[in-house]
Amino acid sequence: MANEFKVGDGAHYSINGDSYPCTVRKVSKSGRQVWVSNDSYKVTGGSYYEEGDKPCIFTSRDVPESEWKGFRLAKNGQWVEQGCRASRGRYLGFELYSGRAYSHNPHV
């Protein structure tokens, strides 16, 4: 299965061209739900107005479980935010991917 996660893995969630780094904190026994916490990041190059991934230094943070964000594996194979609904086959909310990344698209 693509984008399988285990506790401690780096990941990022994305919406509307923006991506935010996070760390996997918990994986359900079935492997179909994961919880992540936001990472700290420092942009080390590039311009705010450039599209695409920015070079960064990422730091995992210890935060309370109440601040974790939950994701579930949808029928189409995408990792989507828990509670997120589909509209015309597209999920409306954050999607989770493996590997840490940060990007910001100021034009969206």
Image: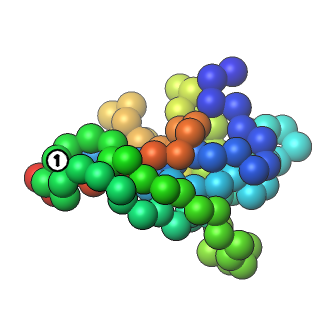
Secondary structure state at the residue bearing disc 1: loop
Q: Where is residue 33 in the image (x, y as percent from the top left)?
A: 71, 46
Most extreme residue toward the top, as rendered? 1
Q: For the N terminus, which image quadrant?
A: top right
Colouring style? rainbow
Residue 106 picture quarter: bottom left
Relative to the observer, which residue lies in front, 25 or 54?
54
Say above or below: 38 vs 80. Answer: below
Q: Where is residue 51 in the image (x, y as percent from the top left)?
A: 20, 44
Res. 19 in view: no
Q: In this view, does 18 lie to the left or right of 83?
A: left
Q: Is residue 69 left or right of residue 8?
A: left
Relative to the observer, which residue lies in front, 85 or 17?
17
What is the crowding at mark 1: few (fewer than 14 residues within 10 Å), some, or many (at least 20)?
few
Q: Position of residue 10 (x, y in %)?
A: 63, 46
Q: Which amino acid does the dot numbered 1 rest on? A: Glu
Residue highlighted by disc 1: 50
Q: Is residue 90 left or right of residue 71?
A: left
Relative to the observer, which residue lies in front, 85 or 81?
81
Which residue is found at the position 78% from the left and 42% from the top?
A: 6
Q: Where is residue 89 in the image (x, y as percent from the top left)?
A: 39, 31
Which residue is found at the position 19% from the left and 58% from the top?
A: 48
Most extreme residue toward the right, as rendered? 29
Which residue is found at the position 58% from the left and 37% from the top?
A: 98
Q: In this view, does 101 lie to the left or right of 5?
A: left
Report the label total. 1
Residue 66 picture quarter: bottom right
Res. 29 in view: yes
Which residue is found at the position 53% from the left and 57% from the top?
A: 58
Say above or below: 68 vs 8. Answer: below
Say above or below: 88 vs 100. Answer: above
Say above or below: 61 vs 49. Answer: below
